[in-house]
């Protein structure tokens, strides 16, 4: 496998893994509700998770493709992505649990006034996606050598870095 | 071999340890809690009911038994909506609440969310609610906080006491406080003596006992320790017809024990797994309530799921000379 193919595969793998961990809470809740004998259930939380998972896929894919061109070592973006995935997996579920568990009356009141659960669920998971992106960028920034730019990764990097610094 | 500097090693270590800890936390705690609890908000039932459409007479009564319904979430609303729809075709004037009517907070603060909002159509139709108090904390012992919550429930629902008896048509109901201090602990003789006297003086054709903790159960909590030894003999001696309980979040009907039929009806808003025991007649993990109709010498009980389908139906015949 060529280096470029490997980069694409790794970027796609991380993006897809992110999609899955965002989707899991909705799939688990839906499955449990249906197992409980409820004949049907609104697909709002599944749709919200799928939407946020897709947003994360796009963000992660674009970030990884950018970082592949900038990274001093590929290892840096893999490590950063691993940490981001951990934060995404944890926050996509834990934030939901906390928000739903600690403010049930507020959500009931909102639902009573027609506020869609889709927005609540997507909003909370959107925060998780942002946290994961921030984590990835922080670790990548922290791992990358700071100082005069090096030309070992080719001219495109130098051009991009000079543009960013100017 | 990959050579890493100090930062790379540290960041990779954080990632690997974090991944391991996260996997354990999610699988062991977060996902089970998220799926077991009824946390999703939903819409209140929008069902119009004819007030006081039921008929109660000396030989006729309809009522519903609902257990563990205190989430106010989407599943509780689905059960409550089905109860309202059932009322449209088979009206009833009483709901026997089998405990745990409020999770996730104080009942005073959550009254609208867990009681008024889901059961609004039935409340507006004039249906009465009578409560067997629950525990809220998956243990038999009441904490001070639990006692405070119970006091709030008794006050807001206008319940006369922690254990009491009521009569509706041909049925005498006995609502018990099934906590350790009250029914199986040091204070047990007080309530058991009261129950013994109340059952002795009961003159109605049917006797129904409602309590939170099940004497017989194959659910997650199982049979309540001490109940079969201390409570069950009293119930069988007085020819109680039906014992309704909750606590385990499922439906289970027990084969008659010394002439007494026991039912666990705890699927009011969430569900847990239920097995089968030697005493099990029917068991199902499902959201449900029990609709009971008494006509003449027959009591027919139907376990209704949220989609309106029937999980179980059984009929009891009145016992002569009891």
Image: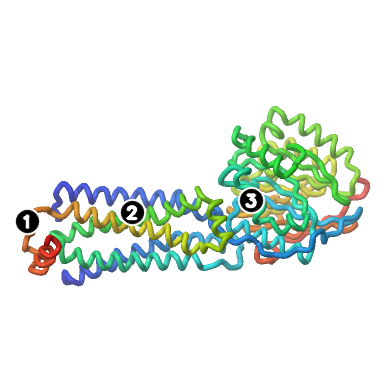
Look at the numbered disc 1 and give the secondary structure of its residue: loop
Q: Chain of mark 1?
A: A
Look at the numbered disc 3 and give the secondary structure of its residue: helix
Q: Which of the numbered marks, if any, corresponds to residue B112?
A: 3
Q: Which residue is mark 1?
A: A148
Query: What residue sits 12% from the left and 53% below the top?
Result: A146
Q: Nearer the viewer, residue A37 or A92?
A: A92
Q: Quadrant of residue A75?
A: bottom left
Q: Which quarter of the image is occupied by the N terminus of chain B?
A: bottom left
Query: What residue sits 35% from the left and 59% below the top?
Result: A129
C-alpha distance separating marks 3 and 1: 64 Å
Q: Are marks 2 and 1 on the same chain?
A: yes
Q: Which residue is mark 2?
A: A87
Q: Nearer the viewer, mark 3 or mark 1?
A: 3
C-alpha distance separating marks 2 and 1: 31 Å
Q: Are marks 3 and 1 on the same chain?
A: no
Q: Residue furthest top?
A: B186
In the image, taking residue A1 as reference, residue A24 lies left or right, namely: right
């Amino acid at each position: 496998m060529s280096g470029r193919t490997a980069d694409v595969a790794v970027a796609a793998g991380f993006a897809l893994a992110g999609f899955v961990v965002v989707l899991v809470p909705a799939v688990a809740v839906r499955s449990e509700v249906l197992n409980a004998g409820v004949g049907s259930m609104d697909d709002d939380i599944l749709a919200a998770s799928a939407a946020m998972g897709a947003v994360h896929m796009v963000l992660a894919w674009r970030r990884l493709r950018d970082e592949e061109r900038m990274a001093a070592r590929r290892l840096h973006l893999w490590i950063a992505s691993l940490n981001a995935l951990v934060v995404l997996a944890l926050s996509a579920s834990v934030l939901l649990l906390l928000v739903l568990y600690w403010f049930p009356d507020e959500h009931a009141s909102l639902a009573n006034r027609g506020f869609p659960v889709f927005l609540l669920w997507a909003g909370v998971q959107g925060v998780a996606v942002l946290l994961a992106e921030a984590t990835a960028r922080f670790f990548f920034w922290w791992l990358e050598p700071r100082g005069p730019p090096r030309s070992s990764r080719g001219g495109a990097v130098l051009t991009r870095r000079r543009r960013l610094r100017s | 071999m990959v050579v890493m500097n100090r930062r790379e090693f540290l960041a990779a270590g954080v990632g690997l340890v974090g991944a391991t800890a996260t996997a354990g936390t999610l699988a062991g705690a977060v996902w089970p809690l998220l799926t077991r609890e009824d946390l999703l908000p939903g819409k209140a039932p929008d069902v119009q009911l004819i007030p006081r459409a039921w008929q109660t007479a000396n030989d006729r009564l309809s009522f519903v038994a609902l257990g563990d319904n205190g989430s106010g979430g989407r599943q509780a609303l689905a059960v409550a909506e089905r109860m309202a729809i059932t009322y449209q075709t088979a009206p009833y004037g009483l709901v026997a609440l089998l405990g745990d009517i409020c999770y996730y907070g104080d009942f005073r603060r959550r009254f609208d969310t867990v009681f008024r909002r889901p059961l609004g159509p039935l409340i507006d139709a004039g249906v009465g609610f009578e409560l067997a108090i629950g525990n809220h904390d998956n243990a038999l012992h009441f904490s001070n906080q639990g006692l405070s919550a119970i006091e709030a429930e008794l006050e807001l629902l206008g319940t006369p006491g922690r254990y009491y008896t009521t009569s509706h048509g041909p049925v005498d109901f006995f609502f018990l406080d099934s906590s350790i201090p009250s029914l199986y602990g040091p204070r047990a003789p007080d309530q058991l003596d009261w129950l013994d006297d109340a059952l002795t003086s009961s003159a109605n054709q049917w006797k129904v006992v409602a309590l939170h903790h099940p004497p017989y159960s194959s659910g997650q909590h199982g049979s309540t320790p001490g109940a079969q030894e201390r409570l069950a003999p009293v119930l069988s001696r007085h020819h109680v017809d039906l014992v309704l309980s909750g606590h385990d979040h499922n439906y289970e009907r027990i084969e008659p024990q010394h002439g007494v039929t026991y039912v666990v009806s705890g699927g009011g808003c969430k569900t847990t797994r239920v097995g089968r025991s030697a005493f099990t007649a029917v068991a199902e993990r499902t959201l449900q309530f029990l609709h009971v109709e008494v006509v003449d010498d027959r009591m027919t009980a139907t376990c209704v799921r949220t989609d309106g389908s029937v999980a179980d139906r059984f009929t009891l015949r009145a016992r002569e000379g009891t």
